[in-house]
Image (tube, rainbow, N blue to C red):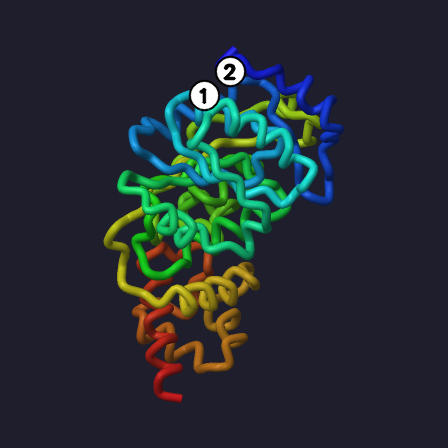
Amino acid sequence: MIDDLPPLREVVARHGLDAKKTLGQNFLFDLNLTSRIARAAGPFEDAVVVEIGPGPGGLTRALLAQGAHVVAIERDQRCLPALAEIGERYPGRLTVIEGDALEIDVAELVRATGAKGPARICANLPYNVATALLTRWIEAEPWPSVFDRYVLMFQKEVALRIVATPAQRADYGRLGVLCGWRTKARILFDVSPAAFTPPPKITSSVVELVPNPSPLACNPRALSQITQAAFGQRRKMLRQSLKSLGLDAAALLAKAGIEETRRAEEIDVAGFVALANALSAARGRE
């Protein structure tokens, strides 16, 4: 036990919190596991931790027990009474925001707390919005953000894409470029389907992303457009796949110093940044 609150299974049964597939919910009941995830995001002296989709609060309790101040964003109204009970156990250290994390500026949320210490995001992300949330946070301006670390759980196949480089061609794509551009990402450990209720059909992985305070200069929107075009037709040479941008693909590639016959999976982060900068320059001349 990490605190004197009731076991999570009892909390879920009492509040009728069956996991909803439509919300991408898979609850973690193993407090040893949630404590391990929380430790990976610590230490928490004066730290504010944003948690997305806390559900009945298993990870929330672990974060609080280890000293974090938690701002939890939950869109499922059914979970709010259970989270309120946790807040009573840890007075003044849990703020619950009812809403959709895709519609909330989490950095602004942290600034509004007036916190003086570090801020980070730690979450068992709902699978159906995990990639969209991460992409939004990585592309956010200004950079670096207020967060000094992100410790997040994804489906393992997504985690592999986050940390991939051209050396892992099968997994390397837009997500790997974006995360490799602005962060240093690594997989900390895997989590068995049996740890969840209901158990998903896939293994999950906990990923740590540490922001790079000085990434290569680049417009995030241009980088997003370039990677979408390039990996949208990843089997084709770049001189063909980049035509979807509506510009002279050969000129873009020449400007970036990249051979026309190369494919997206062969280009590293610096190469995609050069392409994005070439795209920005070309668009500026239109």
Name of the residue lying farthest toward the top: 1
Give me the disc on residue 36: 1
Whether 124 is drawn above or below 109: the answer is above
Asked if the residue under mark 2 is in contact with the one under mark 1, i.e. CB atoms within 8 Å, the reply is yes
The foreground one among 68 and 185 is 68
Residue 93 screen position, x and y as percent:
43, 31
At 44% from the left and 35% from the top, the residue drawn is 70
At 51% from the left and 72% from the top, the residue drawn is 240
The foreground one among 80 and 230 is 80
Q: Quadrant of residue 267?
A: bottom left
Q: List the residue tagged with mark 2.
A: 32
The kind of secondary structure element at disc 1 is helix
Name of the residue lying farthest toward the bottom: 286
Amino acid tagged 2: Asn
Amino acid tagged 1: Arg
The C terminus lies in which quarter of the figure?
A: bottom left
Give me the disc on residue 9: none
Mark 2: few, some, or many residues within 10 Å (few <14, many ≥20)?
few
Residue 196 screen position, x and y as percent:
64, 25
Q: Quadrant of residue 260?
A: bottom left
The foreground one among 142 and 163 is 142
The kind of secondary structure element at disc 2 is helix
Mark 1: few, some, or many residues within 10 Å (few <14, many ≥20)?
some
Residue 215 screen position, x and y as percent:
27, 55
Whether 115 is drawn above or below 277: the answer is above
Whether 98 is drawn above or below 1: the answer is below
